[in-house]
Image (tube, helix red, strand yellow):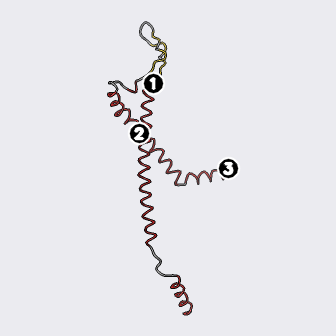
């Protein structure tokens, strides 16, 4: 059991796990921001284009609600709320688009950085040839 706990502690202490945890938390917050953007800004515009309807309220009523004489609901309606589904699809597309753009920028920066490193490595020339180094070693040995 002690070995398991030690291995688990070592696993948690690795930087990759901590980075991943931070990414999950930030990703969750980013998802909420995009969901709000879609629900509060984009969907009202889509609704206006579609004739002034609230798209998230679109539904297909399979079985209407059962009401009593006073208008109280005895059994709620059974409906497919496809408007909420459309909103979730738009959320997904926007999040996927943002991640795609971010990764594209990250990959371009990484490629540019690695090309700079390769150029720096190629530009560095050895200061001495092997013959010069061997000559220096011979001189040092002669002194001793």
Q: Earlier in the sequence, mark 2 or mark 1?
A: 1
Residue at numbered disc 2: 94
Q: Is 138 located above or below residue 7 in the figure?
A: below
Which of the pair 81/36 is nearer the observer? 81
Give the Cα distance between marks 2 and 1: 21 Å
Q: Position of residue 112 (x, y in %)?
A: 42, 59
61 left or right, relative to 134: left
Q: Secondary structure under badge 2?
A: helix
Q: Residues within 10 Å of mark 1 (few under 14, many from 20)?
A: some
Give the Cα distance between marks 2 and 3: 46 Å
* Of the two numbered discs 2 and 3 in the rendering, the one whose residue sits closer to the viewer: 2
Residue at 53% across, 82% down: 130
**Do the numbered discs 2 and 3 sit on residues whose CB atoms are within 8 Å?**
no
Farthest-out residue, right: 1
| Residue 48: quarter of image | top left
Q: Is 4 located above or below residue 79 in the figure?
A: below
| Residue 91: quarter of image | top left
On residue 1, the disc is 3
On residue 81, the disc is 1
Q: Position of residue 64 (x, y in %)?
A: 46, 14
Q: Is 105 located above or below residue 115 in the figure?
A: above
């Amino acid at each position: 059991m002690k070995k398991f706990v030690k291995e688990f502690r070592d696993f948690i202490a690795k930087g990759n796990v901590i980075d991943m945890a931070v990414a999950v938390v930030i990703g969750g917050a980013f998802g909420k921001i995009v969901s709000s953007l879609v629900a509060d800004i984009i969907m009202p515009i889509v609704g206006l284009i579609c004739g002034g309807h609230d798209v998230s309220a679109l539904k297909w009523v399979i079985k209407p609600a059962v009401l009593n004489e006073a208008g109280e609901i005895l059994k709620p309606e059974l409906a497919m709320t496809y408007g909420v589904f459309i909103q979730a699809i738009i959320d997904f597309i926007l999040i996927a688009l943002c991640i795609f753009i971010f990764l594209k920028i990250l990959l371009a920066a990484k490629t540019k950085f690695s090309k700079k490193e390769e150029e720096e490595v190629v530009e560095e020339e050895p200061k001495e040839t092997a013959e010069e180094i061997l000559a220096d070693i011979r001189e040092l040995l002669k002194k001793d």
